Image (cartoon, coloured by chain):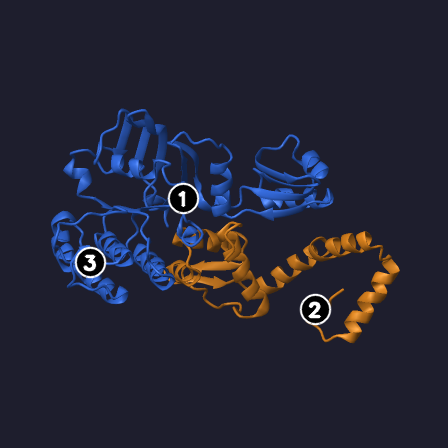
Chain colours: A orange, B blue
Amino acid sequence: MDDSQPLYLQLAREIERQIVEGGLKEGDQIPSTNELAAFYRINPATAGKGVNQLLAGGLVEKRRGIGMFVAPGAAERLRSQRRARFADEYLEPLLAEARRLGISLDDLTTLIHHTAGARPAGQSSGV
Amino acid sequence: MSTSTMTAPVIRTHRLTKRYGSVTALDHLDVTVPGQRIVGLLGRNGAGKTTLMQLLTGQIFPDEGEVEVFGERPAENPRVLSRVSFVAEAQKYPYSFHARHVLSVAPWFFADWDADLAASLVDTFGLPLRRPVAKLSRGELSMVGIIVGLASRAPLTFFDEPYLGLDAVARRLFYDILLADYAERPRTIVISTHLIDEISPLLDHVLLIDRGRILLDADADVARGSTTVVSGATSAVDRFVEGRTVLARHSTGPLARATVAESYDAVAAPATAAGLTAEPVTLQQLLIDRTSSRQGRTS
């Protein structure tokens, strides 16, 4: 974990990532607060705050006396949230750097097609 | 943790002041620590951390102000002191004592002493029991303190610089054991240190002291997200920080860097738009920025 950002948010993001990538499936039980605290070596109250954040967002649900489980539809909801943020998080910085380097929108579009065609998905390109 | 555990404060000081001759070690300190927390007592050497812990454990008397632990004055108060464990940085033991003697007398002082836990910690750390304490290395002496502090299971436990001389593996063991035991038996644990990078994730509250005054009394995650460094061209940095609270500023001609008292999330977008780079600040860096900004220590 990175000590310059609130740890409870980092924990919540990490569990969200597991849900989106399928490491945690809908209906799966998520580890207890104490298990998460021990695994990430963070304070149990901090871990609890991270899990509560997911609970408040409806991504996990509580079954009394048993624990927390990934809620139905959680993965799709997270994917659609990410799609909504895609332009801000990925396109804005890309366009800003392109402007700085004098790469036109047309050139950028060509470059994207070229990179997507020339390289296997997932591999980074050194633009 | 349920809200019912967040009861009356375990520690409360009001205008607490301690002087040694012309040196004011603590200067009208107001601190309130709720129960069931792992608290980091942070600050540079000589900031007043040990003095505060000595006052809280009734080892010395205040010159001014009030100190309360579990709602009562700690000095010469067995109701308080039987529930408090203090592991000093330079803990003195009787001459010729072996580590096993330390562990065998500990139950006289601590009502909740857990001998099984102590034995298993001795095993885990590989502490030599049959050697005079005076012959132990600095790291082994720290192990004795950590074992006594944890196995005392006191409702309020102080560790003063607990990991001096411990190697990286032993420190990691300490953190893991502390977390596991705290999860099993929540209590209030105060850890004083000037090296916080490693232990920072374990804390849920931080108290930052500088020259006897409190600089920061906050939830650790709030503190973690509270400041941001912006850097870039000096003119752009200066324009950006105008009207914002600046905690530290450095510049070298055309380049400047400033720490502002705002969260990364709030600052990142406008800083980028102004052509600056924004970076979040670690707790350790925050401590350095906050305590080095006012130079000219009088000691």
Q: Amino acid at mark 3?
A: Lys
Residue nearest the observer in this picture, B109 or B287: B287
From what the image shows, is residue A86 above or below residue B42? below
Residue at 42% across, 61% down: A36
Task: For the residues labelled 1 and 3, say whether their Cβ atoms are less than 8 Å apart.
Answer: no
Residue B8: percent from left, percent from top: 31, 37
Number of marks in picture = 3
Residue B213, by quadrant, is top left
Instruction: Check disc 3 and report the residue beneath it.
Output: B135
Q: Give the Cα distance between marks 2 and 3.
A: 57 Å
Q: Amino acid at mark 1?
A: His
Category of crowding for the residue at label 1, using alpha-carbon neighbours closer than 10 angstroms: few (below 14), some (14–19), many (at least 20): many
- The mark found on residue A124 in the picture is 2
Q: Circle 1 — which element?
A: strand
Residue B115: percent from left, percent from top: 17, 59
Q: Amino acid at mark 2?
A: Ser
* Badge 2 and badge 1 both on one subunit: no
- The mark found on residue B205 in the picture is 1
From what the image shows, is residue B13 above or below residue B282? above
Category of crowding for the residue at label 3, using alpha-carbon neighbours closer than 10 angstroms: few (below 14), some (14–19), many (at least 20): few
Q: Circle 2 — which element?
A: loop
Q: Give the Cα distance between marks 2 and 1.
A: 40 Å
